[in-house]
Image (cartoon, rainbow, N blue to C red):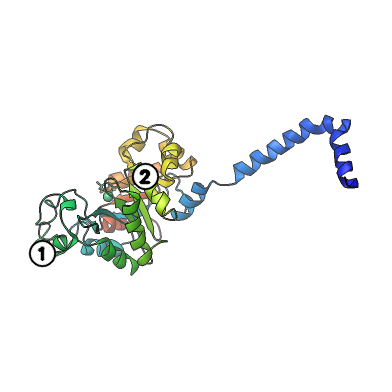
């Protein structure tokens, strides 16, 4: 045993040290508590930096164009996405499903009937068949012949802008299926500009396993109990929820923020609800009318800002 080892043992056994041990333990505990208190958790860092900051009540929220700019062009088509890109929306939101031959395409409804001249479930059609459908005439003859975009086409379009994308994976996805999406995101060079959203925790868990670098948003019309538990289940950085829930549960926005999570609200399309959401302190507003929301924010509204 070396002299210094002997010295350490003597020090450890000394009466003076034993007397001071409780004080040392208390100091160590205090130091640990201080470190934990001032060190943000991973989700604090992610949500706040991802959305510039977590808003306070009255601070202007960012805009996400829901299915593009769906009031001015057929939803979830390239013209609708281009309009949202041309607005001051920070995000373009869209919905992703798989065709019968496993190609990720852009479509909200389970069936093709409402927004195309096809019919029946999306998953019964091949990508080639879907690519021949008219996804614009139902909206206006001006958009006749507009096609259902693939995810690849959507990503390529958003890539040409400075916008970010929210990809909502509709329904439930396996790991292998989510891997297809992350592969396309990588190929498009959009890895740092894509967030994956879903109502389905298991789907987001699959994304977390396959592509942990892609931030995740859990969509839930309402949150029962501790929001951090829901978010932790799938490593979500934010919760997408309804204004009705936030109003019904006073302090909900604060509780979600205190958990280090962002709050996005869907889908708000008029000045009254935009103002109410901003007053609540949400971080992002998902809207069918990003151009109109931008105009309202820049106009004489109480939330008018410089840019
Ligand atoms: O992002 C939330 C919202 O898009 C979810 O609802 O039905 O419009 O896809 P839905
Ligand atoms: Ca959606």
Q: Residue furthest bottom?
A: 160
Is residue 3 visible in the rendered image? The answer is yes
228 sits left or right of 63 in the view: right
- As drawn, the label of residue 194 is none
**How many labels were placed on the picture?**
2
The image shows residue 62 at horizontal and vertical percentages of 38, 54
Ligand 1 closer than 8 Å to the CB at disc 2? no
Residue found 48% across the figure and 44% down from its top:
260
Residue found 46% across the figure and 42% down from its top:
257
Q: Quadrant of residue 167?
A: bottom left
Q: How many other residues sit within 10 Å of disc 2, few (<14), some (14-19) or many (≥20)?
A: many
> Quick one: SS at disc 2?
strand
The image shows residue 44 at horizontal and vertical percentages of 50, 47
> Quick one: SS at disc 1?
loop
Residue denoted by label 1: 144
- As drawn, the label of residue 218 is 2
Which quarter of the image is occupied by the C terminus?
bottom left
272 sits left or right of 250 in the view: left
Ligand 1 closer than 8 Å to the CB at disc 1? no
Which of label 2 and label 1 is nearer to you?
A: 2
The image shows residue 120 at horizontal and vertical percentages of 12, 50
């Amino acid at each position: 045993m070396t002299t210094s080892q002997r010295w350490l043992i003597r020090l450890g056994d000394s009466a003076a040290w034993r007397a001071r041990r409780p004080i040392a333990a208390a100091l160590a505990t205090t130091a640990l508590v201080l470190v934990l208190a001032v060190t943000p958790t991973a989700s604090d860092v992610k949500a706040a930096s991802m959305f510039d900051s977590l808003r306070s009540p009255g601070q202007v929220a960012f805009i996400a164009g829901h299915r593009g700019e769906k009031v001015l062009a057929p939803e979830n088509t390239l013209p609708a996405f281009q309009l949202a890109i041309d607005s001051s929306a920070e995000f373009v939101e869209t919905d992703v499903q798989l065709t019968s031959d496993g190609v990720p395409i852009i479509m909200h409804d389970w069936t093709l009937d409402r927004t195309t001249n096809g019919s029946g479930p999306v998953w019964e059609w091949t990508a080639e068949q879907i690519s021949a459908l008219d996804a614009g005439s139902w909206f206006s003859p001006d958009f006749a012949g507009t096609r259902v975009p693939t995810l690849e086409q959507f990503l390529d379009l958003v890539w040409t802008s400075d916008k970010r994308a929210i990809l909502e994976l509709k329904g439930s996805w396996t790991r292998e299926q989510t891997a297809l999406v992350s592969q396309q995101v990588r190929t498009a060079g959009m890895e740092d500009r894509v967030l994956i959203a879903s109502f389905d925790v298991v789907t987001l868990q699959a994304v977390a396993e396959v592509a942990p670098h892609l931030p995740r948003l859990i969509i839930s019309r309402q949150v029962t109990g501790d929001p951090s538990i829901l978010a932790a289940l799938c490593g979500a950085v934010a919760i997408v929820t309804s204004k009705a829930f936030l109003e019904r549960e006073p302090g909900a926005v604060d509780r979600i923020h205190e958990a280090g999570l962002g709050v996005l609200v869907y889908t708000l399309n008029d000045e009254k609800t935009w103002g109410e959401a901003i007053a609540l302190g949400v971080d992002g507003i998902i809207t069918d009318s990003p151009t109109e929301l931008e105009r309202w924010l820049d106009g004489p509204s109480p939330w008018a800002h410089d840019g």
